[in-house]
Image (cartoon, helix red, strand yellow):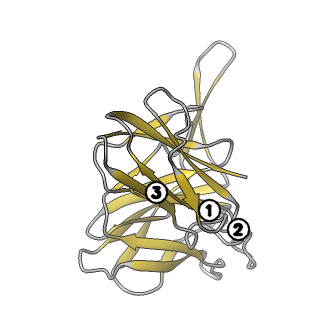
Amino acid sequence: MRVWAILCVGVCAGVTAVSGVGLESVYPAGGCAGSEFEVEVGGTSSALTHAVFSGEGVKATLLGPPRVVTYSKKGRPVVSFATDRCRFKVTIEKGAVPGVRQLRVGTAYQLSAPLGFEVGTLPEAGGAFTNRAEGAVTVLDALPVCVNGRLQGGCDRYRFEARQGATLVAFTEGRVGGRGGRSRSLTFLDPDGKPCGEAVTYGPADAPVAALEIPRDGFYTLVVGAA
């Protein structure tokens, strides 16, 4: 999921691949031109050798499966490697043209069906890759920003400071992360943790837009969920 908050939001959704190499999700589902970062793809084959993007200026280097930490009954950490996910280092050149690309992962003999991956122009923010804390909140240091989230198992929360009279717009990008468009929701919470009655939401269910004129100074939260 990608959400822009001018605020801005992107959501990572799943899709079943139609070829022998599965590609169900990608997180984050994009990045800013001139940056280098890790992405995690889900539903993949253990024999992956590479990833490719449409267009020019975006490259990926295979890093391998992510480590997963669980705990024994005695509280000791147990480290294993995920079998259905894989990490890549993605490099986006400074001159890469902004827009949605097609991402595919492959083995020596096959490529997966594509997922959308966006080259953007805004700073990026996101949560942890694995072992996410339930109900965790991502703090946004400044706006505008593009936030990357995942909706599996609950909702994503983004906390930010805003001043009275400012108008904030949050919108999701429905073209990245997957196909088939799950319904999504955007909710602003005021400094007391209550839904902002002044917020207006419109647009399609798979890519809603929410606007809010800040009624008073304080720290607000944007909650992004899915049906």
Q: Which residue in the protein does label 2 denote?
A: 15
Residue 27: in sight, yes or no?
no
Residue visible at 66% across and 79% down in the picture: 113
Other residues around mark 1 within 10 Å, as few (<14) / some (14–19) / many (≥20):
many
What is the x, y in percent for residue 121?
A: 31, 69
Disc 1 is placed on an element classified as strand
| Side of 172 relative to 59 (left or right) | right
Query: Which numbered disc, 1 or 3, marks the residue closer to the eye?
Result: 3
| Side of 138 relative to 121 (left or right) | right
Other residues around mark 3 within 10 Å, as few (<14) / some (14–19) / many (≥20):
many
Residue 181: in sight, yes or no?
yes
Dot 3 amino acid type:
Ala
Dot 2 amino acid type:
Val
Which image quadrant: the N terminus? Answer: bottom right
Q: Which residue in the protein does label 3 denote?
A: 170
Other residues around mark 2 within 10 Å, as few (<14) / some (14–19) / many (≥20):
many
User: Disc 2 or 1, which lies upstream in sequence?
Assistant: 2
Is label 2 in contact with label 1 (beta carbons under 8 Å)?
yes
What is the x, y in percent for residue 11?
A: 56, 58
Residue visible at 54% across and 48% down in the picture: 66
Residue visible at 73% across and 79% down in the picture: 19
Q: Gap in Å between the C-alphas at discs 1 and 3?
A: 22 Å
